[in-house]
């Protein structure tokens, strides 16, 4: 670190000064307030510094707007602010997929995604998978083939699977295994989940 | 004599909780009377034909789970609820000199703080204090403000070092090594002297962490004098009783609720510290308090499978007849006890002489807890390993060696006759399904392409699973023809709700979806903890009993309508009719309406002849693997699990339980190991990245098979437990397949690439 001091950014505050400032231990009081509401330079250009921000999200098809703290995760916001407890907190560090939700159609680990970054995006959680009383074919297949046991990892598996089958409607077993490899099932029901996904794919294809 | 185990919970003496370990205990098994004249082998019986029982039934609560509406403890949110957090010791051994909670309490948003008992810290991660605050972040900040003064002490976390007489003492004034179990029958020295072949080998198993997806958690709320607790537990009644003692309130004033839970595998069998902390903080603040443990906590302070270091010596005649077995085991369970692993060697194979000596070694790590099939899993790995190594020395087919020493009585064919034992059928079905004839005749004898070697292995399962007499269930019939079945059991994800519905529906001539199931509340009729594969053989017979009584009443009511005698009434398709005059019918709806009010029928799972017969579950697992001898990587290609668990109630969920047991065993056999750091006394891998759990990429297709063996004595349905039987032999089967592939037994799980390569190196060196 000492050998490679960060270059001063043209805009003012260097990353090194910034980190040094944090290192004094006066995180909330000494360093951040002067920066809040301003912008700092990054490789991608200048970005604003927030401690809070009002964001708008489309959650399961419904538009909503609320204030989040800059370091709140999407998972905490969904569970605590919106009472959508389908996505689960299992490892809280991106290791298990129990919190998987779809963001603009793509699966993300909500525990690793800052809510502030989701501003303007569409989130789909397991609560939004069915259409009214009509279950999504993936949900039906997980029940029919008993693709779970305790069900705690299931919302994550369902979201991953629905995004996967939208991209690959007729997957091979190896493709299924690869697609699921970011979701842990501690009850160990993978071998039954393979069958559920195969059945779901067939339903979606109308086969 | 020896313990054992969950079976003894069923001896009518009731179960108790060993609070220090926070798990279901092993009580002493009463000395079993061995009849001078052995009873005759029981006659074969057949199961009745059923409409629902034994068939695949979809879960009745599936919709709740797949829509995310199922409420787990993690999801419980009460009005005014605070979030609690627990402060844990960073030191593996220390005196707590002082705790100052004032700075934490001064933080805005903090409403309560408590010191937690124990002035002495014996492992890193032990609880010290707890706070309750308006939200999680405030609670976390408050923890950092608590001032704890420790006086650190020497510690030891490595069990082999802990055996040293100079090692720091984990428990005050007590040695680190303590006798755990001993057992003798016959004369092993005489047996070994008569043997043509004697094989001695040592097998080791590591520390396997349960890591249920839902971490341990509780929400406690006082409603006046009444304590209501939502808890992620396998044992609502046990938690109720434990909480009543801990909080010094009558058990009648405590209600424990668990609707859904995200796994337990033994780690949630007892009263947890965080539950008591939540109840205390709720009492102090007058608000509901929720405490969820973190993933790290789950790796550090709520248990794991203890390690084992098992040395087997086996003596056999040239034809494979076993003459003597001895086992010396050192187990380690941290500040708790290790597991007794001897049941498989004592029971499974016919052998007149057997001697067991087991010790537990205490260390400064968290206490172990029962882990799916405690003891048997480790024991099966050792016993089944040495059986395969003996078979190689004798130049025998390992399956033939097992069949040669087949027993029909427990205690190695010297005890009580098994009421039923379908292990022979498991061997037969499983061998056929895996293609046993494709195995290498000699271990390591396969050609293999390039650096890859194929192998096939077998391992045997024995477990209990007879259930607990005294389990209660109610059936409630309503005049509008709705039916409720109520039992204070819990559904861990094994499908207990559906199972109760299936049994009630079968008996009452309805469909499973016609039944409303209520469980997971300690105010409901008593049922045992869900561990030890107790749930199905306890709950299903109690529901059956209640439902049979309900049918009797319905028939009596129908008889009055039909103007015939009650014993003339037969149940048909949603109607009753007279046997003597089948044209006389009355619809279910009319009979139920005639009840005029809801009517409750009490059912009980009654006793069974435990002193005349041995009641066990069995299984045989077959694995096919490929091993890359250059990288040491093991891949499981195919797996067949044949189980004898008596009458299966729901084939669909039973298959899942078997698949899960196999997967967990495969994962433990290849990947899972908690690692301690000697210098800091802490867990090195307290997360799900560094503690590797099998993913879909590691798991092949698994074939569960059930043999059709009906036990007419065990209970009114002939049902036995299944969860643990499916876990017992799965690591062992993979290890034996690896042995068959590469010609050297790895003898230690997890069989990491490093250990596989080391074993190969030793083989090359000719040792």
Image (spheres, helix red, strand yellow):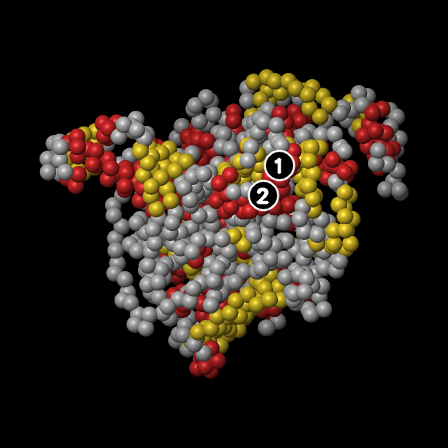
- Identify the image quadrant of the C terminus of chain A: top left
Residue B560 located left or right of residue B702: left
In the rendered structure, find residue B247 and report the number of the disc placed on it. 2
Q: Nearer the viewer, residue B207 or B357?
A: B357
Circle 2 chain = B
Indicate the position of residue A121 as horizontal and vertical percent values.
63, 22
Circle 1 chain = B
In the rendered structure, find residue B283 and report the number of the disc placed on it. 1
* Sequence-earlier tag: 2 or 1: 2
Q: Quadrant of residue B294?
A: top right
Q: Nearer the viewer, residue B643 or B509?
A: B509
Indicate the position of residue B53 as horizontal and vertical percent values.
31, 43
Q: Residue at x 51, y 39 (%)?
A: B253
Q: Residue at x 57, y 34 (%)?
A: B221
Q: Secondary structure at mark 2?
A: helix
- Identify the image quadrant of the N terminus of chain A: top right
């Amino acid at each position: 670190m000492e050998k490679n001091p960060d270059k001063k950014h043209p805009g003012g505050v260097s990353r090194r000064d910034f980190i040094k400032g944090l290192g004094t231990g006066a995180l909330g009081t000494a360093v951040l307030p002067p920066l809040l509401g301003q912008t700092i330079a990054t490789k991608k250009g200048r970005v604003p510094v927030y401690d809070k921000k009002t964001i708008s999200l489309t959650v399961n098809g419904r538009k909503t707007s609320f204030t989040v703290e800059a370091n709140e995760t999407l998972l905490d916001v969904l569970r605590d602010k919106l009472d959508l407890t389908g996505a689960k907190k299992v490892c809280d560090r991106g290791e298990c997929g129990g919190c998987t939700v779809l963001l603009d159609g793509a699966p993300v680990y909500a525990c690793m995604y800052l809510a502030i970054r989701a501003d303007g995006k569409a989130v789909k959680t397991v609560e939004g998978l069915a259409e009214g009383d009509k279950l999504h074919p993936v949900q039906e297949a997980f029940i029919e083939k008993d693709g779970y046991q305790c069900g705690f990892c299931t919302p994550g598996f369902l979201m991953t699977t629905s995004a996967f089958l939208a991209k690959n409607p007729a997957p091979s077993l190896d493709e299924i295994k690869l697609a699921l490899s970011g979701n842990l099932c501690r009850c160990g029901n993978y071998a039954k989940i393979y069958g559920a996904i195969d059945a779901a794919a067939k339903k979606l294809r109308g086969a | 004599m020896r313990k054992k185990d969950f079976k003894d919970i069923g001896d009518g003496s009731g179960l108790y909780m060993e609070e220090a370990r926070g798990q279901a205990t092993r009580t002493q098994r009463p000395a079993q009377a061995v009849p001078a004249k052995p009873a005759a082998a029981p006659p074969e019986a057949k199961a009745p034909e059923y409409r629902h029982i034994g068939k695949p039934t979809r879960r009745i609560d599936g919709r709740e789970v797949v829509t995310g509406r199922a409420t787990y403890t993690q999801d419980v949110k009460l009005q005014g609820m605070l979030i609690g957090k627990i402060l844990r010791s960073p030191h593996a051994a220390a005196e707590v000199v002082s705790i100052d909670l004032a700075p934490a309490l001064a933080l805005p948003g903090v409403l309560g703080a408590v010191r937690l008992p124990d002035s002495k810290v014996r492992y890193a991660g032990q609880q010290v204090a707890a706070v309750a605050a308006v939200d999680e972040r405030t609670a976390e900040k408050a923890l950092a403000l608590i001032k704890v003064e420790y006086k650190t002490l020497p510690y030891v976390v490595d069990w082999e070092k802990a055996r040293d007489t100079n090692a720091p003492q984990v428990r005050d004034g007590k040695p680190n090594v303590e006798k755990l179990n001993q057992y003798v029958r016959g004369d092993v020295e005489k047996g070994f002297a008569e043997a043509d072949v004697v094989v001695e080998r040592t097998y080791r198993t590591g520390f396997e962490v349960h890591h249920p997806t839902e971490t341990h958690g509780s929400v406690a709320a006082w409603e006046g004098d009444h304590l209501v607790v939502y808890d992620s537990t396998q044992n609502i009644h046990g938690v109720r009783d434990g909480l009543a003692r801990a909080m010094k309130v009558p058990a009648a004033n405590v209600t424990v609720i668990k609707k859904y839970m995200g796994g337990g595998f033994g780690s949630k069998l007892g009263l947890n510290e965080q539950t008591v902390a939540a109840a205390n903080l709720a009492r102090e603040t007058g608000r509901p308090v929720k405490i969820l443990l973190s993933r790290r906590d789950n790796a550090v302070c709520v248990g794991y499978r203890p390690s084992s270091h098992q040395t087997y010596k086996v003596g056999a005649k040239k034809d494979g007849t076993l003459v003597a077995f001895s086992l010396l085991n050192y187990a380690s369970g941290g500040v708790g006890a290790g597991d007794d692993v001897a049941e498989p060697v004592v029971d499974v194979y016919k052998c007149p002489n057997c001697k067991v000596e087991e010790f537990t070694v205490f260390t400064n790590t968290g206490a172990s807890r029962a882990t799916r099939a405690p003891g048997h899993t480790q024991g099966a790995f050792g016993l089944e390993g040495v059986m395969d190594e003996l078979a190689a020395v004798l130049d025998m087919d390992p399956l033939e060696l097992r069949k040669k020493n087949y027993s029909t009585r427990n205690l190695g064919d010297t005890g009580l006759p098994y009421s039923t034992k379908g292990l022979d059928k498991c061997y037969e079905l499983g061998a056929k399904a895996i293609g046993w004839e494709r195995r290498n005749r000699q271990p390591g004898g396969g050609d293999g392409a390039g650096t890859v070697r194929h192998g096939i292995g077998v391992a045997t399962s024995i477990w209990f699973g007879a259930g607990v007499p005294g389990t209660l269930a109610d059936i409630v019939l309503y005049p509008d023809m709705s039916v409720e079945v109520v039992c204070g059991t819990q559904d861990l994800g094994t499908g207990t709700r559906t199972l109760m519905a299936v049994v009630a529906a079968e008996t009452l001539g309805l469909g499973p979806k016609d039944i409303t199931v209520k469980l997971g509340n300690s105010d409901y009729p008593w049922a045992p903890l869900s561990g030890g594969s107790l749930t199905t053989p306890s709950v299903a017979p109690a529901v059956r009993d209640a439902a049979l009584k309900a049918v009797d009443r319905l028939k009596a009511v129908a008889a009055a309508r039909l103007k015939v005698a009650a014993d003339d009434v037969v149940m048909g398709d949603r109607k009753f009719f007279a046997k003597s005059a089948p044209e006389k019918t009355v619809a279910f709806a009319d009979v139920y309406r005639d009840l005029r009010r809801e009517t409750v029928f009490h059912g009980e799972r009654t006793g069974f002849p435990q002193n005349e017969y041995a009641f066990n579950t069995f299984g045989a697992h077959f694995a096919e693997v490929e091993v890359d001898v250059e990288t040491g990587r093991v891949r499981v290609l195919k797996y067949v699990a044949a189980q004898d668990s008596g009458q299966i109630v729901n084939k669909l969920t039973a298959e899942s339980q078997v698949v899960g047991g196999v997967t967990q065993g495969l994962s433990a056999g290849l990947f899972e190991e908690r690692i301690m750091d000697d210098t800091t006394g802490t867990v090195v891998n307290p997360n799900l990245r560094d503690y590797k759990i099998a993913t879909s990429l590691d798991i092949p297709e698994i074939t569960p098979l059930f043999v059709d063996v009906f036990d007419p004595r065990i209970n009114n349905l002939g049902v036995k437990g299944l969860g643990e039987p499916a876990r017992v032999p799965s690591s062992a089967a993979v290890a034996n397949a690896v042995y068959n592939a590469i010609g050297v037994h790895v003898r230690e799980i997890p069989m990491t690439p490093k250990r596989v390569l080391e074993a190969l190196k030793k083989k090359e060196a000719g040792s």
